[in-house]
Each structure stands twice: as structure tokens, then as C-alpha cells.
Image (cartoon, rainbow, N blue to C red):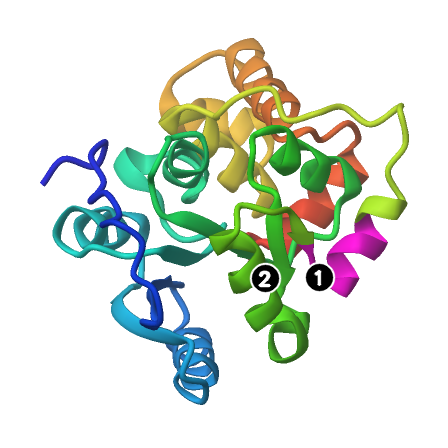
Amino acid sequence: MQASRVVREDAPRTGEPLRVIVADDHACIRLGVASLLHATARALVVGEASNTHGLAMQLDMTACDVVISDLCMPGLDGEYGSLTLLRRLAQTRDAPAVVLLSMVSTPHVLTGLLHHGLNVIVDKRDVAHDLLLAVAAARARKPFLSRRARETLARADATFALCAGMPSAREWEVFQLYAQGMSICQIAQRFQRSGKTISAQKRSTMRKLGLVTESDLSDFATQVGLS
């Protein structure tokens, strides 16, 4: 399996249901999304995944039109979530369209996602009302934000930093430990590195995620289930 490869879409399939892969590390979310799609004649779930590795395998093996995926599933090779893979899909011509599911309510993180080309975003609290609209928009290659995502974006302003890249596996590990309550000194002892190195890795992760203050970090960690 090569995570960098995706099964390309076939020629337009007029009148046939959209083929959808659903990816989320919570079974209840996958079930809810699948049930909602099955209730219509417009979409057919052809695959499910509970982590980024599983999503990459599904994309290698299964032709689909739309991927509906959580942002914060366990990632590939220890990296942060599914962002790298989803961004690659969004920026690859003829790859499946992407609908991003998220609970992120930090304005500059959401702005950063849009900056990376992930412009169809549904807050998980809006799934029942907005998911089908989002799927249709994604298939038409049009942007769409659910109600709560729009409200979050409305709070953004020019002072917010955009996401500046993907944390490395070690940076993300340091960030997780810090978010879970370990001090810089404790993390440095754990990895047998200097406190200066650990602080730099933590700051780098914050910058890449578009987080500015410790309050931003705490809010983000809560939103993605780290604390």
C-alpha cells in the first residue's frame, strides 16, 4: 500500500449514487454519517476507516467520488492527524473530493485549513443539517462551510496566523505531552534533550497549527481531544 497514491475517479457516472468513503476514529460518527447517506438515494458508502492509515488503504483499493473524513484521526508515521493526506487529496487534480469533519472552533486554525485548500468543512454538531449539502458542494468542487464553521470563521481577523506546515512526528509527540500536562523539563528528561530544544519543538508546532497563545493551545487541545 502506498499512502501517496489514490484511486482516481472514473468518468462521470450520470444518474448513479456518489461513492463515499467515511473516515473517523469514532464508530458512532461513522455510523451516523453512513446512516444519513443511506437514507438518500444520492450517495453510497463504499468504504470506512478508523485512522489515516486505513483511509490511505481504502483510497488505494476503492474508487470513490467523495471522502468524508475527521481531521484528528491518528496519523501516518506519528504525524499530526489526517491533515497531510487530506490536503494532498484537495490539491490533486481528479482525486476524490474532500468533506472535512471537525470540532475545531479556533478561528485561525480554520482559516489555515481553508488556506490549505480544505474548503468544505462541517462542524460535527452540524452534520444532521449540513452534511448532504456539503457532499453536493464537494462533488461540484465548490466551497461550503456549515453554520458553526461559518460562525467560527467570522471571528477571524487579520491578526490570526495561518497554519504554516505540518508538525513532524517528534514535534507532535512533544505537543501532545505538553497539552496533557507535562512540563518542558519533564518532556526534556523523557527524550533526553535540552529544555531549549523541547521549547523550540513546541513553539514550532504551535506556529504550524496557527496557534499564538497558551490559551489557543489549550483550546485546540480540548477541541481535538488531547486534554
Q: How many marks?
A: 2
The magenta segment is: 145-152
Q: Residue at x 52, y 51 (%)?
A: 140
* 32 to the left or right of 2: right
Give the SS element for disc 1.
loop
Q: Three-letter amino acid code at disc 1? A: Ser
Which x, y percent locates residue 2?
Answer: 14, 35
Which x, y percent locates residue 161?
Answer: 76, 23
**Residue under circle 2?**
134
Question: Could you tell me how far apart the alpha carbons at marks 1 and 2 are, in whole angstroms?
Answer: 8 Å
Q: On the rendered image, what quadrant is the C terminus found in?
A: bottom right
* 120 to the left or right of 69: right
**Residue under circle 1?**
146
Viewer-nearest residue: 206 or 110:
110
Q: Residue at x 60, y 73 (%)?
A: 127
Q: Could you tell me if the residues under marks 1 and 2 are in contact, i.e. CB atoms within 8 Å? A: yes
Which x, y percent locates residue 213?
Answer: 79, 30
Q: Residue furthest left?
A: 1
Q: Quadrant of residue 26?
A: bottom left
Q: Is residue 148 magenta?
A: yes
